Image (cartoon, rainbow, N blue to C red):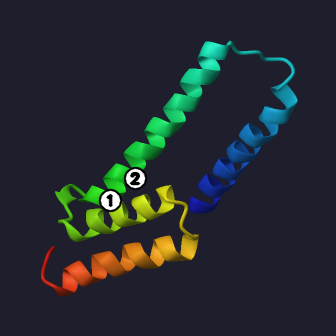
Amino acid sequence: MSWIAILVLAAGTYAFRFAGPVLRERISVSENVKRYLSLAAVALLAALIATAALLDGTSFVGIARPAGVLVGAVLAWRKAPFVVVVVAAALTAALLRVAGVE
C-alpha cells in the first residue's frame, strides 16, 4: 500500500511541476494576485519558522532554541557567511542548554 501512495504522490508532484512551464503562456494573473502570492509565501515561511523554533509537538521548547534561531536570523540579516550563521546559532543554543537555561 505504501508503494502505491509513493507512486501517486510522485506522479502528482511531477504533474504540478510539469504544469508550470506548460500553462505559463495560457494563464495570466493580475499584478495584485502576484503581489498577494508573494506575500502568502513569506507568511507561510514565517509561520513554518515560528512553529519549528518555538514548539516541539504541542509544547513550548524553552528559551535555548528560539535564542539560537534569533542569533542565526540576525547574522543572516547582517549577511554573515552561512557556515557562521549555522555554527553561531547551534553554539548559542548549546551554551544556553549547558548553562541550564531550557
Whole-percent x, y for residue 59 in the image:
17, 58
Whole-percent x, y for residue 16 in the image:
72, 38
Q: Which residue is drawn at 46% across and 40% down?
A: 44
Q: Which residue is drawn at 48% across and 55% down?
A: 77
Q: What residue type is labelled 1?
A: Ala
Are the two marked residues, 1 and 2, in contact with CB atoms closer than 8 angstroms?
A: yes
Residue pointed to by mark 2: 49
Q: Nearer the viewer, residue 21 or 43?
A: 43
Whole-percent x, y for residue 6 in the image:
63, 57
Whole-percent x, y for residue 81 in the image:
58, 70
**Mark 1 element type:** helix
* The residue positioned farthest toward the left in the image shown: 100
Q: Which residue is drawn at 69% across and 54% down?
A: 7
Crowding at mark 1 (Cα within 10 Å: few <14, some 14-19, many 20+): many
Q: Which amino acid does label 2 sit on?
A: Ile
Q: Quadrant of the C terminus?
A: bottom left
Q: Which of 32 and 80 is in front in this view?
A: 80
**Mark 2 element type:** helix
In space, the residues marked 1 and 2 are separated at their CA atoms by 6 Å
Crowding at mark 2 (Cα within 10 Å: few <14, some 14-19, many 20+): few
Per the rendering, the mark at residue 53 is: 1
Per the rendering, the mark at residue 71 is: none
